[in-house]
Amino acid sequence: MASKAYDYIVVGAGAAGSIVAARLGEDRSVRVLVLEAGPSDNSIYVRMPAAMSYPLTDQRRTWSFETGPEEALGGRMITHVRGKMLGGSGSLNGMVYVRGNPRDFDTWAKDGLPGWSFAHCLPYFKRLETYDKGANIYRGGDGPIAITTLKGDLPVFAAFIEAGQQAGHPLNPDYNAYRQEGVHIYQANIDRGVRASGGRAYLRPALRKGNVDLKLNALVHRIDFDGKRAVGVTYEVDGATHTVEAGREVVLCGGAFNSPQLLLLSGVGPSEELRALGVKSVTDVPGVGKGLVDHVAVSVRYRASRPGVSPAMDLNMFKMGLIGARWLFLRSGLGVTNLWEVGTFFRSSAAVDYANIQHEFLPMLGELMHGKVNIEEGFQYQTCLMRPKSRGAVTLKSADPRSHPSIISNYLAHPQDQRDLIDGVRHTDEIIRQRAWDGMRGQALTPGLRTMPDADVLAWLKDNLGTQYHPCSTCRMGVDDMSVVDADGKVHDTEGLRVIDASVMPRITSGNLHCPTMMIAEKLVDRVRGRTPLPPQIVDYADRH
């Protein structure tokens, strides 16, 4: 069934797609269609920060991928959940707001992308945010995404902050400004107690203007080409197939797994691999799906020495109802927090150039996943390796768009990743042994991590680590033969086709990927619109020299 034509078709309504569609729609003469595979984000469990575990079991709103078998982990399979709804993973994630280290972006520039230095990215970071402590040379004050500095005022959080300083880490008032390294209170994209996703802050207002349309529950099968020019897409809703034309461009914003899969299904990728699956090749772009990198993480866990250390203990349905009511009517209480209120960025050893380990701290044991509150008194330092060297790939299993691709991340395959995470875990355990924890620290769930031989720590890592849910770089931006898009997001050897999402990152950034993904979208949509980029802003930062 043929549909009316649009100027732009945006595939995916996640963090990047919501921004791209909204900014394109600022030109009222332009017609934009957004195709999203999942439903609306209209759920209290999506909007309430503390309820973020509940959507993870909602199969309508999630892509539940399996990555592996992971050879370096003894063949383990790792479940990797992504958001499939308005707002994408930004409607599902932990809302921790981290730009990355400024040096990350200067490295992108050194890799052959001079317009992607930190000086060139900073104006776009500032454009997207409203920082609750006000605008300054590093921070924005009037952007769509509200940034809240969490309170971090519970005794368990105070112990974390004090122990980090006792272990030699400076207290950092703003890790998104001059210095990333140190112990800190986290910032979150939470707007007056409500999740501030790209879908809520950008796309919903754009839909009210009339020239941006959103079609939900629409699974895109392929990009349609005339020669090497993208001219539209074919998609499915309720079992019926539709086609829609794009007069100017098709913009893929599906994320690090779905965007490469759609390129491959459409004939853009390694031609020999595609022919083996019966997919007609449009153009040979060998890097599609290659270079997958993801943050790997493991929790160092301790029980509490006494009751009262952890919040949200002994929750029954009545108490949970009170938390929900207080959030709903007063926007206060436990419901307004994501619980990841404090953290650390540090170097695993003196041999590392700049901070390569991140702590996300949970003031309880157990899992807040799948809507279950099966927790006990204690705390855990989620220890994340921020710039792993291991690389994986996303490849097709079949030419059926309903079938998930093969995803192998190769976690810990590189020896340097093993070394860095062993060192990071050992230092984490040293921090927990500081005197600030003396009144709360009980039994370690894995005793002696800081004194174990390397081989024993590595064996423990292989059995216990998982993903931090930050995949990227599968449609990498660059100038080498394995890059997929150029500095403007245009797919090599095609016309009218771009990718704008985390998959284009040349290298992974140091921290959570939601914020830099939004920055990429803000920056690249200016190129789609033919606008002159915002002028670079050179500021000093701690790792510049």
Image (tube, helix red, strand yellow):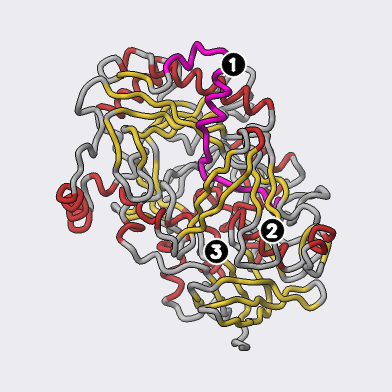
| Residue position for label 2 | 397
State the residue in front, 136 or 445.
Answer: 445
Viewer-proximal residue among 342 and 261: 261
**Count of picture labels:** 3
Mark 3 is on which residue type? Gly
Relative horizontal placement of residue 255, taking residue 158 as reference (left or right)? right
Q: Is 344 covered by the magenta stretch?
A: no
Q: Earlier in the sequence, mark 3 or mark 1?
A: 3
Quadrant position of the N terminus in the picture:
bottom right
How far apart, in angstroms, are the residues tagged by discs 2 and 3?
Answer: 26 Å
Residue under pointer 1: 454
* Of marks 2 and 3, the one in the foreground: 2
SS type, badge 2: loop
Mark 3 surroundings: few (<14), some (14-19) or many (≥20) residues within 10 A? many
Image mark for residue 17: 3
Disc 3 versus disc 1: nearer the observer? 1
Inter-mark Cα distance, 2 to 1: 37 Å
> Magenta includes 468?
yes
What residue is shown at x 67% (from left), y 77% (from top)? 232
x and y, in percent, of residue 437 in the image: 31, 18
Residue 312 versus residue 544 in the image, above or below: below
Q: Give the x, y percent position of residue 323.
A: 20, 49
Residues 260 and 16: in front is 260
Quadrant of image for the C terminus: top right
Between the C-alphas of marks 3 and 1, the distance is 43 Å
